[in-house]
Amino acid sequence: MTFLANIGRGIKKSVGGTVGFFSGSVQELKRVRWPSRKEMVNYTLVVVSTVAVLTIFLFLIDLGINEVLNLIPKK
């Protein structure tokens, strides 16, 4: 019988913890300062340009390694 009581207590504690987590999350999200549209566009442009530059850089490195490997004679 105590086994069932412990299970019930554990379930109640688990549900209470989950509800507390979500209510705390909602309170935190209300305090967040969200970026404006202009800031978001700027952030997006920075990310896209960084990805483009890194893609070109890694592509050139890959081409260079490929050319070096092609210089090695094959048997």
Image: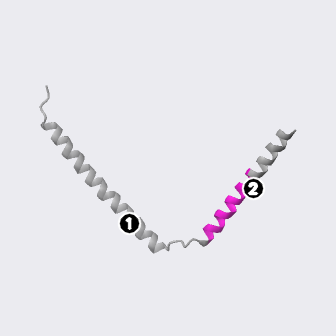
Q: Are marks 2 and 1 in contact (CB under 8 Å)?
A: no
- Sooner in the amino-acid sequence: mark 2 or mark 1: 2
Q: Residue sitting at 70 percent across and 55 percent down?
A: 18
Q: Residue 24 at what x, y percent from top left?
A: 67, 64
Say whether residue 16 is magenta.
yes
Spatial CA span between label 2 and label 1 = 43 Å
Q: Nearer the viewer, mark 2 or mark 1?
A: 2
x then y, percent, for residue 7: 79, 43
Seen in the picture, residue 64 relative to 43 is either above or below; the reply is above
SS for tag 2?
Answer: helix
User: Residue 66, percent across and down?
Assistant: 20, 41
Read off the residue under disc 2.
16
Q: Quadrant of the N terminus?
A: top right
Q: Is residue 63 above or below residue 29?
A: above
Residue range in magenta is 14-30
Q: Position of residue 14 (x, y in %)?
A: 73, 50
Tag shown at residue 14: none
The residue carrying pointer 1 sits among few (fewer than 14), some (14 to 19) or many (20 or more) residues within 10 Å by Cα, namely few
Q: Amino acid at mark 1?
A: Leu
49 in magenta: no
Residue drawn 17% across the image and 38% down it:
69
The answer to which of 36 and 68 lies nearer the viewer is 68
Residue visible at 80% across and 48% down in the picture: 9
Instruction: Name the residue type under label 2.
Output: Gly
Q: Quadrant of residue 52?
A: bottom left
Give the main secondary structure of the magenta stretch.
Answer: helix
Asked whether, in this view, residue 71 is left or right of residue 61, the answer is left
Nearest the viewer among 45 and 2 is 2
Q: Which residue is mark 1?
A: 45
How many marks on residues? 2
The quarter in which the C terminus is drawn is top left
Which residue, as the protein is rendered here, is positioned at the far right? 1
